[in-house]
Image (cartoon, rainbow, N blue to C red):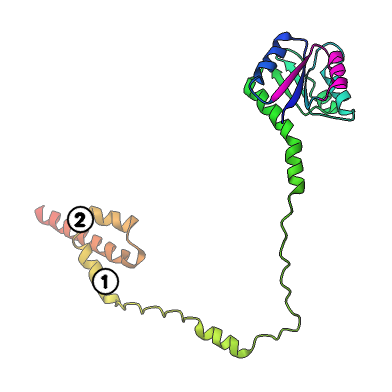
Amino acid sequence: MSRTILIADDSPTIRKIVELTFSDTDIRVESARSGGEALDRLASGQPDLVLADVVMPAPNGYELCRSIKSSERPVPVVLLAGTFEPFDADRARDCGADDHLVKPFESEALRSRVRDLLDRPRRAATAAIEEPAIEEPAAEIPTDAAPPTATAEVETESRTPAAPEPAGELAISTELVEAVAEAVVRRLSPDLLREVALRVVPELASEIIRERIRELEREELEEETGRS
């Protein structure tokens, strides 16, 4: 179904751009050079949407929008404002404008805004006739239901697999630990032994390390005494 938009702007360039933008669509464009001419066209015709320049000759876009919104057929209104023209967002909201565009605008942006506003009533009507989803009532739990029997509890417990018992730890004697530690220590140099004793070895073997260091120091001292 063909729809009609009315462009009310005192700029012939803007009017022509709007006409060309919708020339290959099912949207018909009518033009008005002022707010007064736009009111005359609204009285004689029924456009589906109005594009209104905010600074055109009286009534301006805000006033024209207010008049449209208070009429018996309040169609969508998009306000148009130039890049260097003041745009009053509060006035736009107060007069009931549906949207606004800054000139110069992209043709695709204009098409998108216009189609979105024209299709809004159709989408609202479609949503209104759609049946809401019917929720299933929650199942009621009978108040006289018998409590679970002890037999059921026993069966539930019997089906639960028992946790595996932890494996026994390998028993290692203190003598074996000391023997291994001492064997490792004897293969280390004195400097490395000091470093290990200070930073790496835990308390369990630290005493063995220190004892080995003392033995090495005594051997070094004996060697020096023998040479002298």
Disc 1 marks which residue? 178
SS class, disc 2: loop
Does 151 sit above or below residue 161?
A: below
| Residue 189: image tag | 2
Given residues 149 and 72, the one toward you in this image is 72
Q: Residue at left 32%, top 61%?
A: 201
Looking at marks 1 and 2 on the same chain, the residue that comes earlier in the sequence is marked by 1
Q: Amino acid at mark 2?
A: Ser
Q: Quadrant of residue 77?
A: top right
Q: Position of residue 73 (x, y in %)?
A: 86, 30
Which quadrant holds residue 18?
top right
**Residue at the (80%, 11%) spot, across then down:** 33
Q: Position of residue 114 (x, y in %)?
A: 71, 27
Q: Dividing the image into 4 quarters, which one contains the N terminus?
A: top right
From the viewer's side, name the closer residue of 136 and 213. 136
Q: CA distance from mark 1 to mark 2?
A: 19 Å
Q: Which residues are magenta?
A: 27-46
> Can residue 127 be seen in this snapshot?
yes
Q: Is residue 152 left or right of residue 191?
A: right
